Image (cartoon, rainbow, N blue to C red):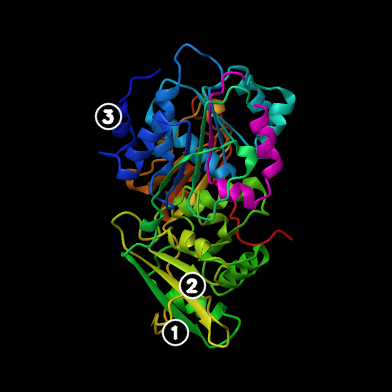
Amino acid sequence: MKEENPDKNILSNIGIESLNPMQLAAQDAIVKDSEVVLLSPTGSGKTLAFLLPVLQLLEDNISKVQVLVVVPSRELALQIEQVWKKMGTSFKVNVCYGGHSLDTELKNLSSPPALLIGTPGRLTDHLERKSFDTSFIKTLVLDEFDKCLQLGFQEEMSMIIEKLPNLEKRILLSATSDVEIPDFVGMESPIVLSYLEEEKSEALSLKKVLSPEKDKIDTLADLLCSLDSEPALIFCNHREVTERVSDLLNNKGILAGYYHGGMDQEDRERVLIQFRNGSLNYLVTTDLAARGLDIPEMNHVIHYHLPGKESEFIHRNGRTARMQAEGTAYIIHFEGDALADYIPDHLEVLPLKSGNPLPKDPEYKTIYISGGKKNKLNKGDIVGFFLQKGKLGKNDLGIIEVKDFISFAAVRKSAVRSLLENIKGEKMKGKKYKIEIARNVIKKEE
C-alpha cells in the first residue's frame, strides 16, 4: 500500500496548495471506513476527494484492476482520467465508454490498469466478455450516483456489483441530497459526509429577466447582447429546444452551439472542446452540462427554462460563482407563466434594452489535427510545429487538447489563414497530418 500522505507532490502537480475541509474529511473516511457516502456540491473538488485516498489503497505488486469507478457519462470518465494523470502517480488508468473504440479498450485491458473508469453500459459489456479479472477489485466508486439512476442504469450497476466478489470498500458520491441507495449497492451502515449546505453561494447573484412574449428568443438575444461578449451557458429542458434556440441565435448573428445527450459522441466532444478553448462563447444545453463536465468557470448561467426540481436548478447555478468567484444566474420569465415554487418571490428584475450591438465573435478558431496520442503526438509536438513551421506567435496559440487519434488546437482567428498556408505540405514528426479548421457543431445536419 502507498504511504499514507502522498499529497505534497500530487498537490503540486495539480496546482493547488492544500485540500479543502471536505477533501480532508473524505480522505480520512475513505481510508478508514468500508462504506462512505459523500454529498458535496458541483465544483467542490469531489474527484480529488476520492482519488487521493484511492491512491493510498492501491498495492504496488498487483498488476490487475484494483479500483473500479462507475460514472454516468463519458465526459465525467475522461475528466477523472485527466485528474489522475495530472496527479503523476505510477499507477496506470484506463477509461471505457460507449462510442469509444472497443478494440482500443480491449488492447488497454490486456495490460490491466490499477484504476478503471467506465460507464455502466460499456463496463457491463466488458464484464460479459471477461475482458479483465475482477477478483482483485477491492474498491468500488459510484460517482454522480443519482445521475446513473436517473439515466436508468440500475440493471447494469446491479450486474457490475454482482461481478465483484471481493469488494471491501464502497464509495458513493453525489452532488444532490436526492439519493436513495438501492439494496443492490450492498451498503448497510455507511458513513455519510454531507456538504450540501454550501451549495448556495453568497457570491451568486440571481436575477429575473422579463420576456414580453412566450417565445423568449428575442429576450435571450437582448440579454446576450448586454453581457459584454462574455461566455454563457444557456439551459433548456428539452433536446430539440437546445437545437432550435441555437439555430435561432445563429440566425440573429450570435454564434452559439448546442449540447445534449442525443448527439453523437464525436459531436458532443467537439462542441465542448470549442466551448472550452474560447472558439465558441455560447452553449445551449440540457441539464447534461449541469455537472460532471470539464468546462470553464462561467460568469453567466441563463435559465431559458426552469427545471422541475430545485436540485437541478442548484446544479446549473453551480457552473458559476465557484470557490471565491462571483457569478450571475438569469431566469428568463414570461409574465403569463407561473414561476417554480423554489424561486424566491422578490427577485431583482434586470432591465433590458434592445438595440445593443451583437456580441463580438470569439477570438479563436479551433484547428483539427488528424493525429493524437496513439500516433505518438503530444502537446509539445503541436506547439513546436505551429510555432516553427506555422510561424505563429506564442500569443496566437491557445488551449491544445490531444485525444487518442485526433487533436484540437485553439488559434487566434487573425492567424489561422497564414498558419494553414505555412504548414501546407509540411510534416510533423516525419508524417503528414490533415490539419484544417474544425467543423462547427452548430446547425443541424440536413
Amino acid type, label 2: Tyr
Which-is-in-front pick, marks 2 and 1? Answer: 2
Q: Residue at x 35, y 44 (%)?
A: 22
Residue holding disc 3 = 8
Magenta span includes 154: yes
Name the amino acid, label 3. Answer: Lys
Quarter assignment of residue 240 = bottom right
The location of residue 351, given as percent across then percent down, is 39, 85
Cα distance in 3D space between marks 2 and 1: 33 Å
**Magenta segment:** 135-163
Q: Residues within 10 Å of mark 1 (few under 14, many from 20)?
A: few
Task: Please name whichever residue, 15 or 156, is drawn nearer the observer in this view of the structure.
Answer: 156
Residue carrying label 1 = 355
Q: Earlier in the sequence, mark 3 or mark 2?
A: 3
The reply to whether residue 186 is in sight is yes
Instruction: Provide the secondary structure element on which disc 2 rests.
Output: loop
* Place of residue 237 in the rendered image (x, y in percent of width and height, measured from the top left): 61, 66
- Residue 125 placement, left or right of 75: right
- Tell me if label 3 and label 2 are in contact, CB under 8 Å: no
| Residue 369 in the image, given as x and y percentages of width and height | 54, 39
Taking the spot 34% from the left edge, 62% from the top edge, the residue there is: 201
Q: Is residue 374 above or below residue 326?
A: above
> Amino acid under label 1?
Gly
Which residue position is annotated with label 2? 342
| Label 3 crowd bin: few (<14), some (14–19), many (20+), radius 10 Å | few
Mark 3 to mark 2: distance in Å? 42 Å
Mark pair 1, 3: CA separation: 53 Å
Viewer-side label of 1, 3 = 3
Q: Dot 3: what SS?
A: helix
Can residue 349 be seen? no
Furthest residue in direction front, as rendered = 189
* Disc marking residue 317: none
